[in-house]
Amino acid sequence: MTSFRPFTSFDLLKYNLVNTDVLTETYGLSFYLSYLANWPEYFVCAETLNREISGYVMGKSEGKSNLFHGHVTAITVAPSYRRQKLANKLMETLEVVTETFHSEAYFIDLFVRESNENAIQMYRKMGYAAYRRVLGYYAGPSTSSNTDDINDETKNKGNKKGPILGEDALDMRKSTKRDVQKVSVVPARRFEQHPWEIEWH
């Protein structure tokens, strides 16, 4: 049985079951602590009966006016707990947080490697649609098709002086209740964009 609860700073001492997986990006303590300090409502973990961390999702709110939205920064599930819909449940939790604590948000978005077909399929089933393709967004190539390891922080912002090498990302969005007309999820007029052209990461 799995329960869901807020991620705490103490969990940083026992989340190795999730973060030692080779497909999961990890960061310094300051990165996680900044999310806990600024967006604690968006940092949720899945916990087993043995009090092991089996997965987590972290996100944030950002943007202004009709671009204000909830953002999925990272979501991952430990290898031994995959194929149990935990990623779906963690995503649903983040969506509820957005609708409850940030009701002025117009949409929820995320970035996913274009090669991660399983993840893209899962998101589409949950109502997300591709808003644009970000060229060379990820700094390195990937052959991962794992739905339970989705992370947008290993990115290549690049610069205008030359080409950027890396894998393209799909910026996927799902409108919230506030966006009644679903304007926020209409694909961008120029579907392919560079990292430096994106308003929010």
Image (tube, rainbow, N blue to C red):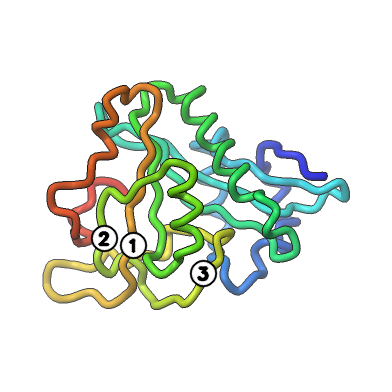
Give left or right: position of 54 versus 123. right
Image quarter for residue 152?
bottom left
Q: Hey, which residue is sitting farthest right in the picture? A: 50
Q: How far is the residue under mark 2 from the one under mark 3? A: 19 Å
* Label 3 CA crowd tier, 10 Å (few <14, some 14–19, many 20+): some
19 to 141, vertically: above or below: above
Q: Which residue is mark 2?
A: 134
Q: Earlier in the sequence, mark 2 or mark 3?
A: 2
174 to 155, vertically: above or below: above
Mark 1: secondary structure: strand
Count of number-bearing discs = 3
Contact check, label 1 and label 2, Cβ < 8 Å: yes
Q: How far is the residue under mark 1 from the one under mark 2? A: 5 Å
Give left or right: position of 91 versus 21. left
Q: Which residue is mark 3?
A: 145
* Label 1 CA crowd tier, 10 Å (few <14, some 14–19, many 20+): many
Image quarter for residue 13?
bottom right
Name the amino acid type tagged 1. Answer: Ala
Q: Earlier in the sequence, mark 3 or mark 1?
A: 3
Name the amino acid type tagged 3. Answer: Ser
115 to 100, vertically: above or below: below
